[in-house]
Image (spheres, rainbow, N blue to C red):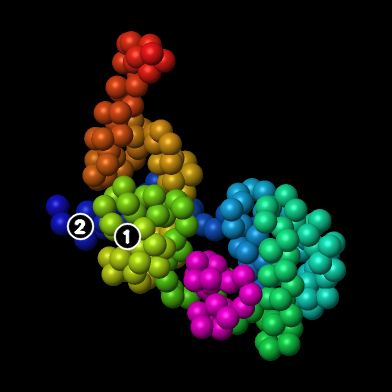
């Protein structure tokens, strides 16, 4: 089966399995999504959502965030990790929004990636989910892992992985494609011990047989004893 034909089947199957797949960061405005996405670096969406509940009340717009005290902001976001650099970037980003964009989040890749703490991945999240603009494909750890396991790319750098995926995936599905892979990565295709035995797209995955074989080998009688020895 050719790669594009196999990918089309994978997309159809993932759409059936995850019909409500969406960005799992809680937000109501583009500004909130931008802040949440910056905070999500090296942090779970669940933790970010806990932190932003109070954060968005304290700093509802770019103007309040730009005027925030560094120490107070660090304390507010501390549990998301890397809080010093994140707080610095958030304040700088908010200052740019307040001074250059009247407090509004711009809706182009070029403008977004000029903001502090905003790379192409973050910009893709905001453009696709806040503005419904298909500018690129979000490449996080889940997308990287699954794209490799599906043999959709041999690259290791996010930018090159995204370029490969953009050539294969129809543009109208770029945002949803990242959601489907992220949801599948979180619910089935784990980094360690993927649940191949129950995988809904196992028959379409080139890595399926390898992981299933490894799982059976580890479960075989005597395997634990050999591993310990």
Is residue 79 rendered to the left or right of residue 136?
A: right
Q: Percent position (x, y) of residue 164?
A: 30, 66
N-terminal of the two: label 2 or label 1? 2
Is residue 206 rendered to the left or right of residue 174?
A: left
Q: Report if residue 14 lies within the magenta region.
A: no
Q: Report if residue 126 lies within the magenta region.
A: yes
Is residue 183 rendered to the left or right of residue 114?
A: left
Q: Percent position (x, y) of residue 162?
A: 38, 66
- Which label number is shown at residue 98? none
Q: Percent position (x, y) of residue 157?
A: 39, 62
- Residue shown at 32% from the left, 60% from the top: 155
Q: Identify the element where label 1 is drawn.
A: loop
Q: Assess whether mark 1 and mark 2 are in contact (beta carbons under 8 angstroms).
A: no
Q: Residue furthest left?
A: 1
Instruction: Give the camera-side residue of 59 and 229.
Output: 229
- Which label number is shown at residue 155? 1
Instruction: Give the camera-side residue of 39 and 88.
Output: 88
Res. 131 in view: yes
- Residue shown at 61% from the left, 51% from the top: 43
Q: Which residues are magenta?
A: 107-127
Marks 2, 1: nearer the viewer:
1
- Residue shown at 37% from the left, 70% from the top: 172
State which quadrant residue 226 falls in.
Answer: top left
* On-image quarter of the C terminus: top left
Q: Identify the element where label 2 is drawn.
A: helix
Callout 2 environment at 10 Å: few (<14), some (14 to 19), or many (20+)?
few
- Residue indicated by mark 2: 3
Q: Percent position (x, y) of residue 57?
A: 81, 63
Res. 29 in view: no
């Amino acid at each position: 089966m050719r790669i594009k034909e196999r990918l089309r089947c994978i997309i159809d199957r993932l759409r059936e399995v995850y019909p409500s797949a969406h960005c799992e960061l809680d937000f109501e405005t583009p500004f909130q999504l931008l802040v949440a996405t910056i905070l999500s670096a090296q942090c779970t969406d669940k933790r970010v959502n806990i932190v932003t509940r109070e954060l968005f009340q304290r700093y509802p717009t770019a103007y309040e965030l730009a005027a925030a005290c560094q120490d107070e902001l660090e304390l507010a976001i501390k549990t998301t990790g890397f809080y010093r650099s994140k707080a610095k970037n958030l304040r700088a980003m908010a200052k740019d929004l307040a001074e250059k964009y009247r407090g509004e989040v711009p809706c182009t890749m070029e403008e977004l990636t000029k903001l502090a703490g905003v790379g192409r991945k973050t910009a893709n999240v905001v453009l696709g989910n806040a503005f419904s603009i298909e500018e690129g494909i979000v490449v996080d750890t889940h997308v990287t892992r699954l794209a490799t396991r599906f043999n959709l790319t041999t690259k290791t750098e996010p930018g090159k992985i995204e370029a490969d995926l953009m050539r294969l995936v129809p543009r109208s599905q770029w945002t949803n494609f990242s959601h489907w892979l992220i949801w599948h990565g979180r619910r089935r295709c784990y980094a360690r011990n993927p649940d191949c035995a129950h995988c809904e797209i196992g028959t379409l995955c080139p890595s399926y047989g390898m992981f299933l074989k490894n799982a059976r080998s580890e479960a075989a009688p005597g395997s634990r004893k050999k591993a310990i020895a």
